[in-house]
Amino acid sequence: MKRIIVIPRIEIQNANALSSPYTIGFPAMTAWLGAVHALQRQLNTKNSDFVELKFNSVAVVNHEFNLHTYKGVGDFNHSIISTSNPLKKDGKRPSTIEEARCHLTVSLVIEYSGIDQNEVEELLELLPALLRRMKIASGDVLDFSQAYSKQIQGHTETQKLMAQLMPGFCLIDRRDLVQESMEQGLDGLDALLGYLKINSTCQKISNETKEKEKIEWTQTRQQQGWLVPIAIGFQGITDIAEDITHSQRDSISQHRFAESVVSLGEFIMPFRIDNLDNILWHYADVENDLYLCQQNQLFIKPQEQ
Protein backbone atom coordinates (compact mmCIF):
# COMPACT_ATOMS: atom_id res chain seq x y z
CA MET A 1 0.00 0.00 0.00
CA LYS A 2 1.20 3.48 -0.88
CA ARG A 3 0.20 6.58 1.04
CA ILE A 4 0.22 9.59 -1.23
CA ILE A 5 -0.64 13.28 -1.33
CA VAL A 6 -1.85 14.73 -4.63
CA ILE A 7 -1.47 18.45 -5.35
CA PRO A 8 -3.46 18.96 -8.56
CA ARG A 9 -3.09 21.60 -11.25
CA ILE A 10 -0.27 23.76 -9.88
CA GLU A 11 0.09 26.81 -12.14
CA ILE A 12 3.72 27.94 -12.28
CA GLN A 13 4.93 31.12 -13.96
CA ASN A 14 8.43 31.77 -15.32
CA ALA A 15 9.93 28.41 -14.37
CA ASN A 16 13.50 27.70 -15.46
CA ALA A 17 13.42 25.85 -18.79
CA LEU A 18 17.22 25.69 -19.13
CA SER A 19 17.39 22.39 -17.28
CA SER A 20 21.07 21.75 -18.10
CA PRO A 21 23.90 23.39 -20.09
CA TYR A 22 22.83 21.30 -23.11
CA THR A 23 19.03 21.16 -23.04
CA ILE A 24 16.06 23.50 -23.02
CA GLY A 25 12.49 22.50 -22.29
CA PHE A 26 10.71 20.84 -19.38
CA PRO A 27 12.37 21.63 -15.99
CA ALA A 28 14.86 19.11 -14.66
CA MET A 29 13.78 16.30 -12.35
CA THR A 30 16.22 17.67 -9.78
CA ALA A 31 14.08 20.84 -9.66
CA TRP A 32 10.88 18.91 -8.89
CA LEU A 33 12.43 16.67 -6.24
CA GLY A 34 14.23 19.69 -4.78
CA ALA A 35 10.99 21.65 -4.44
CA VAL A 36 9.23 18.74 -2.73
CA HIS A 37 12.21 18.23 -0.42
CA ALA A 38 12.10 21.94 0.50
CA LEU A 39 8.39 21.58 1.26
CA GLN A 40 9.11 18.60 3.50
CA ARG A 41 11.77 20.52 5.44
CA GLN A 42 9.36 23.39 6.08
CA LEU A 43 6.75 20.95 7.37
CA ASN A 44 9.35 19.23 9.58
CA THR A 45 9.94 22.51 11.42
CA LYS A 46 6.36 23.77 11.28
CA ASN A 47 4.91 21.22 13.66
CA SER A 48 6.50 18.87 16.17
CA ASP A 49 4.21 16.08 14.90
CA PHE A 50 5.88 16.28 11.48
CA VAL A 51 9.48 15.75 12.60
CA GLU A 52 9.49 12.20 11.19
CA LEU A 53 7.63 13.16 8.00
CA LYS A 54 9.41 12.15 4.80
CA PHE A 55 8.44 12.65 1.18
CA ASN A 56 9.97 9.50 -0.27
CA SER A 57 9.22 9.88 -3.98
CA VAL A 58 7.44 12.18 -6.42
CA ALA A 59 5.60 11.87 -9.74
CA VAL A 60 5.18 14.83 -12.12
CA VAL A 61 2.18 14.99 -14.46
CA ASN A 62 2.28 17.83 -16.99
CA HIS A 63 -1.05 19.34 -18.13
CA GLU A 64 0.10 22.45 -19.97
CA PHE A 65 3.50 23.75 -21.07
CA ASN A 66 4.36 27.05 -22.74
CA LEU A 67 8.03 27.61 -23.59
CA HIS A 68 8.99 31.25 -24.10
CA THR A 69 10.55 31.11 -27.56
CA TYR A 70 9.88 32.86 -30.84
CA LYS A 71 10.39 31.82 -34.45
CA GLY A 72 9.83 34.49 -37.07
CA VAL A 73 8.92 34.05 -40.73
CA GLY A 74 11.87 32.53 -42.54
CA ASP A 75 13.81 31.81 -39.33
CA PHE A 76 15.50 28.43 -39.03
CA ASN A 77 15.93 28.40 -35.25
CA HIS A 78 13.78 29.53 -32.37
CA SER A 79 14.98 32.44 -30.22
CA ILE A 80 14.59 32.73 -26.44
CA ILE A 81 12.19 35.44 -25.28
CA SER A 82 14.22 36.92 -22.45
CA THR A 83 13.43 39.44 -19.76
CA SER A 84 14.59 43.03 -20.06
CA ASN A 85 16.86 43.83 -17.12
CA PRO A 86 17.26 47.47 -15.97
CA LEU A 87 20.01 49.50 -17.59
CA LYS A 88 23.19 50.33 -15.70
CA LYS A 89 24.24 53.88 -14.89
CA ASP A 90 26.15 54.13 -18.17
CA GLY A 91 23.03 53.15 -20.14
CA LYS A 92 24.30 49.68 -21.10
CA ARG A 93 22.65 46.34 -20.46
CA PRO A 94 24.02 44.35 -17.49
CA SER A 95 26.09 41.28 -18.33
CA THR A 96 23.36 38.91 -17.17
CA ILE A 97 23.07 35.50 -18.77
CA GLU A 98 19.41 35.19 -19.70
CA GLU A 99 17.71 31.89 -18.95
CA ALA A 100 14.90 30.31 -20.91
CA ARG A 101 11.57 30.47 -19.09
CA CYS A 102 8.27 28.66 -19.34
CA HIS A 103 4.74 28.74 -17.94
CA LEU A 104 3.34 25.32 -17.04
CA THR A 105 0.62 23.53 -15.13
CA VAL A 106 1.49 20.28 -13.36
CA SER A 107 0.13 17.89 -10.77
CA LEU A 108 2.43 16.39 -8.14
CA VAL A 109 1.89 12.94 -6.63
CA ILE A 110 3.95 12.64 -3.44
CA GLU A 111 4.57 9.38 -1.57
CA TYR A 112 5.03 10.06 2.15
CA SER A 113 5.80 8.26 5.40
CA GLY A 114 6.39 9.11 9.06
CA ILE A 115 2.90 10.36 10.03
CA ASP A 116 -0.44 8.68 10.56
CA GLN A 117 -3.72 9.34 8.80
CA ASN A 118 -5.00 11.75 11.46
CA GLU A 119 -1.96 14.00 11.06
CA VAL A 120 -2.36 14.09 7.28
CA GLU A 121 -5.46 16.26 7.58
CA GLU A 122 -3.49 18.86 9.50
CA LEU A 123 -0.74 18.67 6.89
CA LEU A 124 -3.22 19.36 4.09
CA GLU A 125 -4.40 22.46 5.95
CA LEU A 126 -0.84 23.81 6.14
CA LEU A 127 0.04 23.11 2.50
CA PRO A 128 -1.70 26.08 0.77
CA ALA A 129 0.09 28.75 2.83
CA LEU A 130 3.48 27.07 2.32
CA LEU A 131 3.03 26.51 -1.42
CA ARG A 132 2.15 30.13 -2.10
CA ARG A 133 5.48 31.24 -0.60
CA MET A 134 7.55 28.71 -2.53
CA LYS A 135 9.48 28.71 -5.76
CA ILE A 136 9.16 25.60 -7.92
CA ALA A 137 11.84 25.21 -10.60
CA SER A 138 12.60 28.92 -9.98
CA GLY A 139 9.02 29.78 -10.97
CA ASP A 140 6.26 31.51 -9.00
CA VAL A 141 3.27 29.46 -7.86
CA LEU A 142 0.14 31.27 -9.04
CA ASP A 143 -2.62 28.83 -8.16
CA PHE A 144 -3.43 25.19 -7.43
CA SER A 145 -6.39 22.99 -6.67
CA GLN A 146 -7.21 21.52 -3.28
CA ALA A 147 -4.65 18.90 -2.22
CA TYR A 148 -5.91 15.52 -1.03
CA SER A 149 -4.53 12.27 0.33
CA LYS A 150 -5.10 8.69 -0.79
CA GLN A 151 -4.04 5.17 0.02
CA ILE A 152 -3.32 3.25 -3.17
CA GLN A 153 -3.32 -0.52 -3.28
CA GLY A 154 -3.77 -2.58 -6.40
CA HIS A 155 -4.50 -1.97 -10.05
CA THR A 156 -8.06 -0.66 -9.65
CA GLU A 157 -7.18 2.14 -7.23
CA THR A 158 -4.18 3.10 -9.38
CA GLN A 159 -6.40 3.39 -12.45
CA LYS A 160 -8.88 5.60 -10.57
CA LEU A 161 -6.07 7.94 -9.55
CA MET A 162 -4.69 8.05 -13.08
CA ALA A 163 -8.13 8.98 -14.41
CA GLN A 164 -8.15 11.98 -12.07
CA LEU A 165 -4.83 13.13 -13.55
CA MET A 166 -6.15 13.16 -17.12
CA PRO A 167 -5.62 14.90 -19.46
CA GLY A 168 -1.89 15.08 -18.96
CA PHE A 169 1.45 13.40 -19.52
CA CYS A 170 3.60 11.59 -16.94
CA LEU A 171 7.35 11.98 -17.23
CA ILE A 172 9.07 8.60 -16.99
CA ASP A 173 12.71 7.50 -17.15
CA ARG A 174 14.03 5.92 -20.38
CA ARG A 175 17.71 5.67 -19.54
CA ASP A 176 17.40 2.02 -20.55
CA LEU A 177 17.42 3.12 -24.20
CA VAL A 178 20.64 5.08 -23.76
CA GLN A 179 22.30 2.23 -21.89
CA GLU A 180 21.32 -0.21 -24.63
CA SER A 181 22.94 1.96 -27.31
CA MET A 182 26.08 2.48 -25.23
CA GLU A 183 26.43 -1.28 -24.83
CA GLN A 184 26.55 -1.43 -28.63
CA GLY A 185 29.58 0.89 -28.73
CA LEU A 186 28.14 4.41 -28.90
CA ASP A 187 29.20 7.10 -26.46
CA GLY A 188 26.58 8.78 -24.28
CA LEU A 189 25.98 11.84 -26.47
CA ASP A 190 25.64 9.86 -29.70
CA ALA A 191 23.28 7.43 -27.98
CA LEU A 192 21.14 10.33 -26.75
CA LEU A 193 21.04 12.13 -30.11
CA GLY A 194 20.27 8.89 -31.92
CA TYR A 195 16.86 8.74 -30.24
CA LEU A 196 16.12 12.46 -30.64
CA LYS A 197 16.96 13.00 -34.30
CA ILE A 198 14.41 12.71 -37.10
CA ASN A 199 15.57 10.93 -40.26
CA SER A 200 14.05 12.32 -43.46
CA THR A 201 14.11 10.31 -46.70
CA CYS A 202 12.58 10.90 -50.10
CA GLN A 203 11.72 8.73 -53.07
CA LYS A 204 10.40 9.36 -56.52
CA ILE A 205 6.91 8.15 -57.29
CA SER A 206 6.34 7.32 -60.96
CA ASN A 207 2.88 7.33 -62.52
CA GLU A 208 1.40 5.57 -65.51
CA THR A 209 0.39 8.77 -67.32
CA LYS A 210 4.07 9.73 -67.69
CA GLU A 211 3.43 13.10 -66.10
CA LYS A 212 6.00 14.84 -63.94
CA GLU A 213 7.36 12.51 -61.29
CA LYS A 214 6.36 13.24 -57.73
CA ILE A 215 8.63 13.15 -54.70
CA GLU A 216 7.38 11.70 -51.43
CA TRP A 217 9.10 12.55 -48.13
CA THR A 218 8.95 10.33 -45.04
CA GLN A 219 10.21 11.00 -41.51
CA THR A 220 11.21 8.25 -39.10
CA ARG A 221 12.71 8.03 -35.62
CA GLN A 222 14.75 5.32 -33.98
CA GLN A 223 12.12 4.75 -31.27
CA GLN A 224 8.43 5.56 -31.13
CA GLY A 225 7.10 7.77 -28.35
CA TRP A 226 7.47 11.32 -27.07
CA LEU A 227 11.15 11.15 -26.09
CA VAL A 228 12.86 14.20 -24.60
CA PRO A 229 16.27 14.92 -23.07
CA ILE A 230 16.03 15.55 -19.33
CA ALA A 231 18.51 16.44 -16.59
CA ILE A 232 18.32 13.73 -13.93
CA GLY A 233 21.13 14.65 -11.54
CA PHE A 234 24.79 15.53 -11.15
CA GLN A 235 28.22 13.92 -11.21
CA GLY A 236 30.92 15.14 -8.87
CA ILE A 237 34.05 16.31 -10.69
CA THR A 238 36.09 17.24 -7.58
CA ASP A 239 36.62 15.69 -4.19
CA ILE A 240 34.28 16.63 -1.35
CA ALA A 241 35.76 19.66 0.41
CA GLU A 242 36.46 18.99 4.06
CA ASP A 243 37.51 22.55 4.90
CA ILE A 244 34.81 25.15 4.37
CA THR A 245 36.30 28.48 3.32
CA HIS A 246 34.83 31.92 3.81
CA SER A 247 34.12 32.19 0.08
CA GLN A 248 31.46 29.47 0.18
CA ARG A 249 27.82 30.51 0.35
CA ASP A 250 27.05 27.81 2.93
CA SER A 251 29.63 27.82 5.72
CA ILE A 252 28.33 24.61 7.31
CA SER A 253 27.73 22.04 4.55
CA GLN A 254 30.50 20.28 2.68
CA HIS A 255 30.62 20.99 -1.03
CA ARG A 256 32.06 19.80 -4.33
CA PHE A 257 31.90 20.91 -7.95
CA ALA A 258 29.60 18.88 -10.18
CA GLU A 259 28.23 18.78 -13.72
CA SER A 260 24.77 17.91 -15.01
CA VAL A 261 23.81 14.38 -16.01
CA VAL A 262 21.44 14.29 -19.00
CA SER A 263 19.43 11.25 -20.04
CA LEU A 264 16.26 10.35 -21.91
CA GLY A 265 12.75 10.73 -20.60
CA GLU A 266 9.38 10.01 -22.14
CA PHE A 267 5.97 11.59 -21.70
CA ILE A 268 3.16 9.06 -21.56
CA MET A 269 -0.52 9.47 -20.73
CA PRO A 270 -1.57 8.41 -17.20
CA PHE A 271 -4.13 5.84 -18.36
CA ARG A 272 -1.23 3.61 -19.45
CA ILE A 273 0.10 3.33 -15.89
CA ASP A 274 -0.80 0.19 -13.94
CA ASN A 275 1.78 0.53 -11.17
CA LEU A 276 2.36 3.83 -9.33
CA ASP A 277 6.07 3.03 -8.98
CA ASN A 278 6.37 3.45 -12.77
CA ILE A 279 6.03 7.23 -12.43
CA LEU A 280 7.47 7.92 -8.96
CA TRP A 281 11.02 9.35 -8.75
CA HIS A 282 13.40 9.37 -5.78
CA TYR A 283 16.95 10.46 -4.92
CA ALA A 284 19.66 7.83 -5.30
CA ASP A 285 23.41 7.86 -4.58
CA VAL A 286 25.13 5.50 -6.97
CA GLU A 287 28.72 4.65 -7.85
CA ASN A 288 31.18 6.93 -9.66
CA ASP A 289 30.20 10.01 -7.59
CA LEU A 290 26.77 10.18 -9.22
CA TYR A 291 23.80 11.85 -7.55
CA LEU A 292 20.76 10.88 -9.56
CA CYS A 293 16.99 11.01 -9.63
CA GLN A 294 15.69 7.54 -10.40
CA GLN A 295 12.31 5.92 -10.77
CA ASN A 296 11.10 3.45 -8.20
CA GLN A 297 10.52 1.00 -11.04
CA LEU A 298 11.19 1.42 -14.76
CA PHE A 299 8.14 1.46 -16.99
CA ILE A 300 8.13 -1.31 -19.60
CA LYS A 301 5.81 -0.94 -22.55
CA PRO A 302 3.58 -3.91 -23.32
CA GLN A 303 5.24 -4.54 -26.68
CA GLU A 304 8.66 -4.57 -24.98
CA GLN A 305 7.76 -7.21 -22.37
Image (cartoon, rainbow, N blue to C red):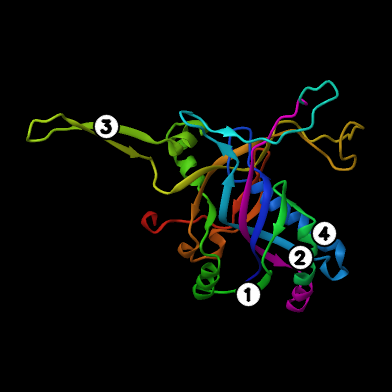
Q: Whole-Å distance between the Cαs marked 2 and 1?
A: 21 Å
Q: Is residue 300 above or below residue 184?
A: below
Q: Label 2 belongs to which residue?
A: 128
- Where residue 210 sits in the image (x, y, percent)? 8, 30
The quarter of the image holding the N terminus is bottom right
- Where residue 170 sits in the image (x, y, percent)? 54, 56
Q: Whole-Å distance between the Cαs marked 1 and 4?
A: 23 Å
Q: Report the residue at 50% width, 48% height from top.
A: 174
Q: Is residue 128 above or below residue 205?
A: below
Along the polypeptide, which appears first: circle 2 or circle 1? 2
Q: Which-is-in-front pick, marks 3 and 4?
A: 3
Q: Residue furthest top?
A: 90
Q: Label 1 belongs to which residue?
A: 151
Mark 1: which secondary structure? strand
Q: Which-is-in-front pick, marks 1 and 4?
A: 4
Q: Which-is-in-front pick, marks 2 and 4?
A: 2
